[in-house]
Image (cartoon, helix red, strand yellow):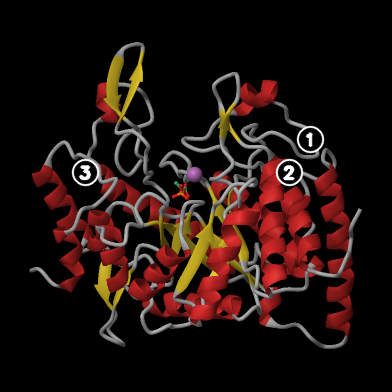
Amino acid sequence: MSTHLDSWRELPAAQQPDWADLSELATVTAELAKQPPLVFAGECDQLKDRLAAVARGEAFVLQGGDCAETFAGSTADAVRNKLKTLLQMAVVLTYAASVPVVKIGRMAGQYAKPRSKPGEIRDGVELPAYRGDAVNGFDFTPESRRNDPQRLMRAYNSSAVTLNLCRAFTKGGYADLRQVHAWNQDFVAQSPAGRRYEQLAGEIDRALSFMRACGANPNEFHDVEFYSSHEALILDYERALTRIDSRTGLAYDVAAHMVWMGERTRDLNGAHVEFMRQIHNPIGVKLGPTTSADDALALMDRLNPKGEPGRLTFITRMGADKIRDALPPLVQKVTENGAPVAWVCDPMHGNTFEAPSGHKTRRLNDVINEVAGFFEVHRSLGTHPGGIHIEFTGDDVTECVGGAQEIVEDDLHQRYETACDPRLNRQQSLDLAFMVAELYGPSTAAAG
Ligand code: PEP
Ligand code: CO
């Protein structure tokens, strides 16, 4: 049956895999369409409310996780380490900047990647590019690089496993604020950011004891609202997981609470914009340095014609050297137009370069510089710097250079594990959180 939910099929869809077997794709998507939802429409609406608060200047988004999640990476340890890092960053921001933090993982569904070239050549051999575990394998062999529709079902299952862990960790006591020290236990001794965090955790402990003594012990201290998100890239997958909400009769993509469109797939006349137009989740759009103000306005018009608060988040990824010039005209025009959007800064994707060793990397200083530029622009225009979107992991990888541990280009080979772009490690993520807290608020709690 074809409905408006399939209208995207008539339009050019960028970055779709050339599947090895189309009848297999049809079988798998029919199977996916019968699977239970991963998230509920009511939860998506709640996130939309939170993002509406961000657009009003009352909250801050912390969105992050791997560039590309892998099936092998959906272990309890790896998921816990990522969540722990996200929780620590959120605590730093909430306490030191005194702002409510909306926590959104690039987790439980981030299995598909856009690529600059469809193929990859090594030693004269050409194979399809790695497009994420939802499509093919990372190993450079013909078997592994086959674009295999069965992988979409594994993407669904790995999303379910990861989201289940996230829900358990954030609702089951692990995210209780009384655990602020425990999250840091394996970390504090060897790192400056860990010691700085420990000092802040001590202050939080004293504040909690004070509040308990006063008789206040609200639920918010015991568990955490956590939301999932990924790039809605493979439209056959997202469509198969789109359902009609029984309460409202509206369509929601139940593969994640929030989905976003990448810089390479946000063509106004393309299939991705058409698909995203039909679903009622909160959605994001990446905006790179070549985006014109008119592009941004046209996207707002198409994706949020009624100006619903919280529906649309613009995730800018300009590059540290461009943001101070490229962002102001966009923010100005969009603000004049009147419809509310949340502005989030992705300081990763405009700052990637290749080290002499051949590793794709990023400098923490460039990341910090782009975030600082984002704050400067919004402060000068009187608009709200609404959040950050980052690629990080909870493990001590060596993929980005810089930070208090002073990782240099020659260190990159030591623990370079990403399946796609270089991620901040735990130390670098915490360094960034302290820096953002300083930029955000007048409070200098636990600085130094
Ligand atoms: C990403 O977020 O991993 C990505 C590919 O970003 P962009 O679309 O902004 O290049
Ligand atoms: Co990336």
Q: Is residue 6 above or below residue 69?
A: below
Question: Image quadrant of residue 146?
Answer: top left
> Is residue 351 at all visible to an observer of this figure?
yes
Mark 3: amino acid: Pro
Mark 2 and 1 residues: CB-CB less than 8 Å, in contact? yes
Q: CA distance from mark 2 to mark 3?
A: 37 Å
**Location of residue 123 with respect to 314 vertically, above or below:** above
Q: Which residue is mark 1?
A: 405
Which residue corresponds to mark 3? Answer: 149
Q: Quadrant of residue 124?
A: top left
Instruction: Assign a secondary structure to mark 2.
Output: helix
Residue with the most extreme top position: 123
Say above or below: 135 vs 40. Answer: above
Give the residue at x 74% y 36%.
402
Q: Which mark is residue 427?
A: 2
Mark toward the start of the polypeptide (2 vs 1) = 1
Kindly indicate the quadrant of the structure image that contains residue 64.
bottom right
Crowding near pointer 3: few (<14 within 10 Å), some, many (20+)? many
How far across and down, in percent of the image, does residue 297 sit? 42, 71
Which of label 3 and label 1 is nearer to you?
Answer: 1
Residue, x 39% and y 47% (percent of image)? Answer: 111
* Mark 1 residue type: Gln
The mark that comes first in sequence, 2 or 3, is 3
Q: Nearer the viewer, residue 377 or 348?
A: 377
- Give how far apart the Cα atoms at labels 2 and 1 are: 8 Å
Amino acid beneath label 2: Gln
The answer to whether the beta carbon of the residue marked 3 is less than 8 Å from any atom of ligand 1 is no
Query: In front here: 236 or 16?
Result: 16
Q: Are marks 3 and 1 in contact (CB under 8 Å)?
A: no
Q: Position of residue 23 (x, y in %)?
A: 8, 46
